[in-house]
Image (tube, rainbow, N blue to C red):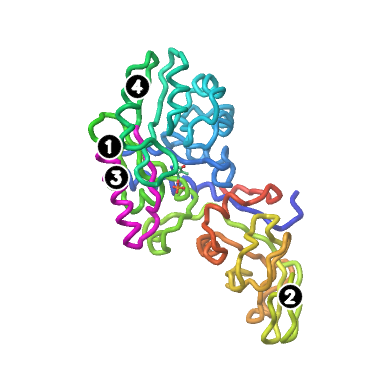
Amino acid sequence: MFYRPAKAYINLPALRHNLNVAKKLAPNSKVLAVVKANGYGHGICRVAQQLSSADGFGVASIDEALYLRQKGFLHRILLLEGLFSETEIPLAIQNRLDLVIHSEHQLLWLLNFQTSLVINVWVKIDTGMHRLGFSTEEVTGVVKRLEQNPNSFNIHLMSHLASADESISTAVEFTQKQIRCFDKTSEKYNFSRSLVNSAGLQVYGQFSYEWVRPGILLYGAGRLSESEYDSHQLKPVMRLESEVISLKWIQAGECVGYGNSWQAQRETYVAVIAIGYGDGYPRHAQVGTPVLVNGKRVSLIGRVSMDMITVDITEYCDQIHIGSLATLWGDDLPIEEVAKWSNTISYELLCGITTRVPMIEVQ
Ligand SMILES: *Cc1c(COP(=O)(O)O)cnc(C)c1O
């Protein structure tokens, strides 16, 4: 029994639906469903179960990969940043994990380890993001050393787009440059290739190559505009809800919350909702952030506390009661909108839901 009303509902059919959207966007590619960071905060095991028709999973650490193996997933599992230390190699190979190699030190670990098993390696190429990856000039040498090593490597080539989700012209030009760079560097090989994440898949779907790597799209979120989302018919997976736990009228001139930072300009009916940054609701959500109470769109006022927020419900004073349902994000309130009001992105909000919020699966 969960007595605190703050709850995250996880819509399982929506996950499957969004995976099908990804498959339709790249009908000739395999889908590596990215489930890192505990399935973007939704629970890695439950997410992987729903996405079991994907061709593989992408995770951020061997811990996440081994957890999936332990739960019985036999899919290909790619460590998106590869290994963090040489000691992980035997474990990674025994468990048949796919490994990104992005730098010389990781390459050396693999070249110096002896195994009879074929290793799936994904050589990461830096096409301009300058985070991870070999420079385009290094790729030939890396490939040659892998091919000449006594171990058998099944080589893939990959890169990552820095701003596929931005539509301003400089970002578009930069993305096109990255695409050309990746294409040029990889075209002379016969290896499987992978370039696009969710935004790349949605906007530059013709560059899906053999593997696509959607993450946020599977959870029905992302930084694309609402109309772009509508056109792809993605369904939000998480609905964050709580309830009204207090109601009171305050006079014009009176303040609400910590620091007295919000002052009423008129007589105001204030509802307190049991959700706060202790649950992962963003503390930086600004005054005006939308919240649905009893289906009505109202505005956040005052500062977000650890366990509570306050909203102005003056307009709906006769329709909202103790126990009225509050939706913080979900079907009728896109998480992107809340993220924007908090100066962040949906990814951070989803990953930030804390363990005290029960997750309830919706079939
Ligand atoms: C996280 C990640 C993805 C997924 O990105 P989204 O924007 O969530 O689709 C794809 N590729 C790599 C290498 C990643 O690290």
Magenta span covers which residues?
A: 157-185
Residues marked 3 and 2 touching at CB (< 8 Å) = no
Q: Is mark 2 within 8 Å of ligand 1?
A: no
What's the CA distance linking mark 3 and mark 2? 52 Å
Please report whichever mark, 3 or 2, sits nearer to the chain's N-terminal start: 3
| Residue denoted by label 4 | 145
Amino acid tagged 1: Thr
Amino acid marked by disc 3: Phe
Mark 1 or mark 2, which is nearer to you? Answer: 1
Instruction: Pick whichever, 343 or 107, lies toward us.
Output: 107
Tag 2 or tag 4, which sits nearer the N-term? 4
- Give the mark nearer the N terminus: 4 vs 1: 4
Which mark, residue 260? 2
Depth check: 276 or 328 in front? Answer: 276
Residue at x-position 33% and y-position 20%: 147
Instruction: Residue 75: tell me if it is visible.
Output: yes
- Residue type at numbered disc 4: Arg
Kind of residue at disc 2: Asn
Compared across the picture, whether 50 is left or right of 283 comes to: left
Cα–Cα span, label 4 and label 3: 28 Å
Q: Which mark is residue 185?
A: 1
Percent across and percent down for residue 334 are 51, 62
Label 2 crowd bin: few (<14), some (14–19), many (20+), radius 10 Å: few
Residue count near mark 3 (Cα–Cα under 10 Å), binned few <14, some 14–19, many ≥20: some
User: Which numbered disc, 4 or 3, marks the residue closer to the eye?
Assistant: 4
Is disc 4 in contact with disc 3, using a CB cutoff of under 8 Å?
Answer: no
